[in-house]
Image: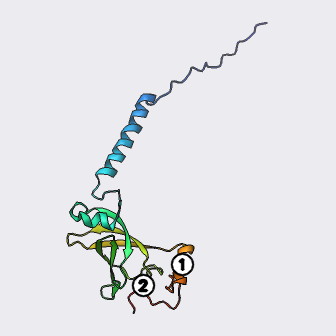
């Protein structure tokens, strides 16, 4: 009696094909550095400087053409609305400096009202003519304690349905 051996083909270990680990890490590193360089060197600066009106208008030449976020108080009586083309104009101030703002959109937030002394943040660029061209207007609502004090002093509130709309007197 003869014993037959299993004559199935032997399987040899398969060698992994591909790049060594160090090369993969190098490729990922190069891609990340390239993406960061692209973001930082693009024509549009990805960073937005956040400043107060006083800071910007003290040295306007150093801020012209940069994307900015500027905060100041709305100058009472300065809101003007033009229908054709649709545009809002107003003045923000802080300390002894004023900044004229142009917002070329038809709609502003409901709380953007004259006569309340509200803080407003605008985002955009300071033009060569010294007028800030805003692409975003963000009025800051007073806190409930500040609103209570203002109501007691007889001031209108942002939510007052009887208050005139911006641009109306």
Secondary structure of the residue carrying tag 2 is loop
Q: Foreground residue, 125 or 130?
A: 130
Q: Mark number for residue 115?
A: 2
Q: What kind of element bears circle 1? A: helix
Task: Kindly indicate whether the residue at mark 2 contacts the one at mark 1 (C-beta within 8 angstroms).
Answer: no
Q: Residue at x 35, y 85 (%)?
A: 77
Q: CA distance from mark 1 to mark 2?
A: 15 Å
Q: Look at 61% across and 19% down and name the residue there.
A: 9
156 and 16: which is toward the camera: 156
Residue 93 drawn at (x, y percent): 33, 73
Q: Residue furthest front?
A: 153
Residue displayed at 34% across by 86% down: 81
The image's mark for residue 31 is none
Q: How far across and down, in percent of the image, does residue 31 sit?
A: 37, 42
Tell me the residue that label 1 is attached to: 149
Q: Residues within 10 Å of mark 1 (few under 14, many from 20)?
A: few
């Amino acid at each position: 009696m003869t014993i037959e051996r299993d004559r199935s083909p032997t399987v040899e270990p398969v060698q992994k094909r591909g790049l060594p680990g160090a090369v993969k890490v190098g490729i990922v590193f190069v891609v990340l550095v390239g993406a960061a360089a692209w973001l930082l060197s693009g024509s549009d600066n990805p960073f937005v400087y956040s400043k107060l009106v006083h800071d910007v208008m003290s040295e306007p030449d150093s801020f012209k053409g940069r994307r900015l976020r500027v905060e100041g108080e709305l100058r009472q009586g300065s809101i003007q609305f033009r229908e054709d083309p649709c545009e809002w104009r107003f003045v923000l101030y802080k300390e002894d400096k004023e900044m004229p703002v142009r917002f070329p959109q038809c709609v502003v937030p409901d709380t953007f009202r004259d006569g309340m002394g509200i803080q407003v943040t605008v985002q955009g660029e300071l033009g060569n003519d010294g007028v800030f061209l805003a692409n975003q207007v963000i009025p800051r609502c007073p806190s409930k304690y500040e609103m209570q004090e203002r109501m007691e002093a007889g001031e209108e509130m942002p939510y007052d349905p009887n208050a005139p709309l911006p641009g109306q007197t």
